[in-house]
Amino acid sequence: MTNRTAALFDLTGKVAIVTGSTKGIGRAMAEGLARAGASVVVSSRKQDLCDEVAREIAEATGAEVFPRACHVGDWDAVPEFIDAVVERFGRIDALVNNAGINPARVRPEEMTLDYWRKVFSVNLEGPLRTSQCVFPVMKEQGGGSIVHIGTMAAYSGGASVCVYGSSKAGLLNLTKSQAMEWAQYGIRVNFLAPGPFQSEMMAGAAATQEGYYDLVAGGTFQKRVADPQEIVGPVCYLVSDASTFVTGDDISVSGGMMK
């Protein structure tokens, strides 16, 4: 790798927020961005867990890591969260909207309005609100990168993931719209769609459905479930200067699953 190429992926001096980053792929992305040189904001709903994970990442990477709890499904809580990040670092170069929920596998005919709204408040309204709040910061500093974490279910839906897939399909559309609106300010917005990754959500589904891991692995060309570390390269690419001409795009990290 030439020095110039290496510099494109170097995140030194950048500040990145990763929501939902105390476990699973969120934690892997936060640590990966820190290893690439970024100062990282670790966030989830519980401050003590944010503190613990931030300490672990800082010790492992030597990066500056700021733990700050925020429930992104609470519309009014987000501005204070973003203000705290700006007060700490003075800038925000990247926002990775990873926080998401799929608390139960509910069939369409069983859907309740409360359940629908609960999932959408986190999976779609959360990314909208955090993006709104980082927009003026990124606009003033001349640009930034927003990465919405979706799912392959956004493209095709699936049995018992009606609300989850629908919320992420809406997030995909939001990605395209924000990218078009904000390109003039140097703000890039992209959608990263993971396939089956080892996670608490995956483990929960497997606990209630025999053969679940084999089922989801069978939907990939590689016939396996991914390790969380396998999401790090793609998110570092989208945050870094290696992807300055990439916006409004949706990139899958799915072992070959069909969109």
Image (spheres, rainbow, N blue to C red):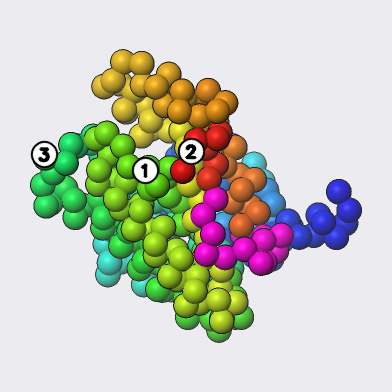
Specify the amino acid type for callout 1: Ser
Q: Nearer the viewer, mark 2 or mark 3?
A: 2
- Of the image marks 3 and 1, the number of the one nearer the N terminus: 3
**Magenta region: which residues?**
239-251
Q: Is residue 148 visible?
A: yes
**Measured along the vertical axis of the image, is residue 105 above or below residue 139?**
above
- Of the image marks 2 and 1, the number of the one nearer the N terminus: 1
Q: Secondary structure at mark 2?
A: loop
Single out the residue that lies furthest toward the right. Answer: 2
Q: Can you identify the residue that label 3 sits on?
A: 110
Please tell me which residue is depicted at 26% across the width and 55% down the height of the picture.
Answer: 120
- Of the image marks 2 and 3, the number of the one nearer the N terminus: 3
**Disc number placed over residue 258 in the picture, else none:** 2
**Disc number placed over residue 156 in the picture, else none:** 1
Specify the amino acid type for callout 2: Met
Query: Label 2 to label 1, Cα distance in Å?
Result: 9 Å
